[in-house]
Image (cartoon, helix red, strand yellow):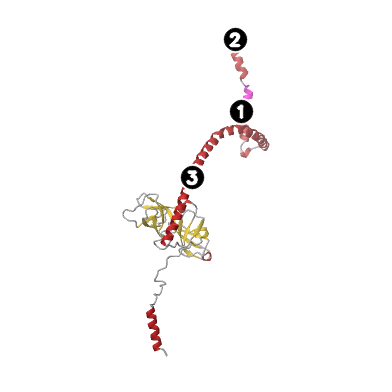
Amino acid sequence: MAQRRSGRWQADDGVRFAPALTVACIVIAIVLAFLDRPDARVQPLADLRAAFNDFAAPVLELAARPLRGAANTGPWWRSQLELAEENRQLRLQVSELRAWRDVALSLQERNARYREALNLQAPAGAERITAWAVADRSNAFVRSQLVGAGAESGVRPGYPAVNVYGLIGRTVDVGRTSSRVLLLTDLNSRVAVMADRSNARALLLGDNTSYPRLDFLSRDPDLVEGDRIVTTGDDNVLPRGLPVGQAFLDRDGRWRVALYSDAAPLDLVWIWPFEPVADPDVDPVPLPVPVDVQAGALAEDGETGP
């Protein structure tokens, strides 16, 4: 029993550190920790650490590449599956768009035939004016945008301004090289609109919020959430058919419009020349004079003449 105990003690003594070595390691660790502070760092020690890091960084990078590659295997295959699914959906959308293109071409041809049969003259499309938005003049009371195109470019007050997605407002103040566009969200904005699906008429009123409201609706308007709202042209202020947004009900049960133009930052705008229909009282056409009245007038002139 004594021999076993002595043998175990010897084995334990073989793996133990000497007390002096343990104390020395603790002292060295404390000194290194003290010298590692930024205010007490020794320059030779800092240079030694930097040299060791320069030597160890490529080795660690080389050793970490297989581990990093194994860790990225799962996300890579996941992204490949997502790309395959996205590619499949895009192919389906392309096929559907091709079908809609054929329908649009057929309707375009039918519309041309109807116009020819009814002797309808489509309004001539004027060339649009491109302008960059240079300053946002919006605040708590006014919602407007300054654009870099004015009278020299052909801009006139009342022209509609659109971006890639839809109508943003109309020009109100036109200078020589700049114009101010009154946005649809401004408190002073009033635009006649309708639902593209049901032709339900309404007036789009700005209230200085991001979602202008629909007012002057009938008691039971034929509107559903998601209806496409476009201009009617009934007010003779804007042309018919300009895309505005989608209708939805707010928390208070009032109809509002989520504007298409909010889908992108207001950077590049197009201003469409639009001339309202003139009032016939402004420039009336003289009525034709009957032939017998003209002959009688000439006869009277001959009798009374010299």
Q: Residue 3: which numbered mark, if any?
A: 2
Q: Measured from the top left, where is residue 272 in percent x and y?
A: 48, 61
User: What residue is at 51 percent from the left and 41 percent from the top?
Assistant: 87
Could you tell me the amino acid type at mark 3?
A: Ser
Which of these two is toward me, 98 or 251? 98
* Residue 19 included in the magenta stretch of the image: yes
- Labelled pair 3, 1 in contact (Cβ < 8 Å): no
Give the quadrant of the N terminus. top right
Residue under label 3: 95
Q: Measured from the top left, where is residue 229 in percent x and y?
A: 41, 54
Which of these two is toward me, 261 or 9? 261
Q: CA distance from mark 2 to mark 1?
A: 35 Å
Q: Measured from the top left, where is residue 36 in percent x and y?
A: 62, 36
Q: Is 7 placed left or right of 263 in the picture?
A: right
Q: Is residue 292 visible?
A: yes
In this rendering, the answer to whether 140 lies above or below 93 is below
Q: Which residues are magenta?
A: 17-28
- Mark 2, mark 1: which one is toward the viewer? 2
* Mark before the other along the chain sequence, 3 or 2: 2
Could you tell me the amino acid type at mark 2?
A: Gln
Could you tell me the amino acid type at mark 1?
A: Ile
* Mark before the other along the chain sequence, 2 or 1: 2
Secondary element at tag 1:
helix
Q: Residues within 10 Å of mark 2 (few under 14, many from 20)?
A: few
Q: CA distance from mark 3 to mark 2?
A: 90 Å
User: What residue is at 37 percent from the left and 80 percent from the top?
Assistant: 293
Q: Residue 26: which numbered mark, if any?
A: 1
- Mark 3, mark 2: which one is toward the viewer? 3
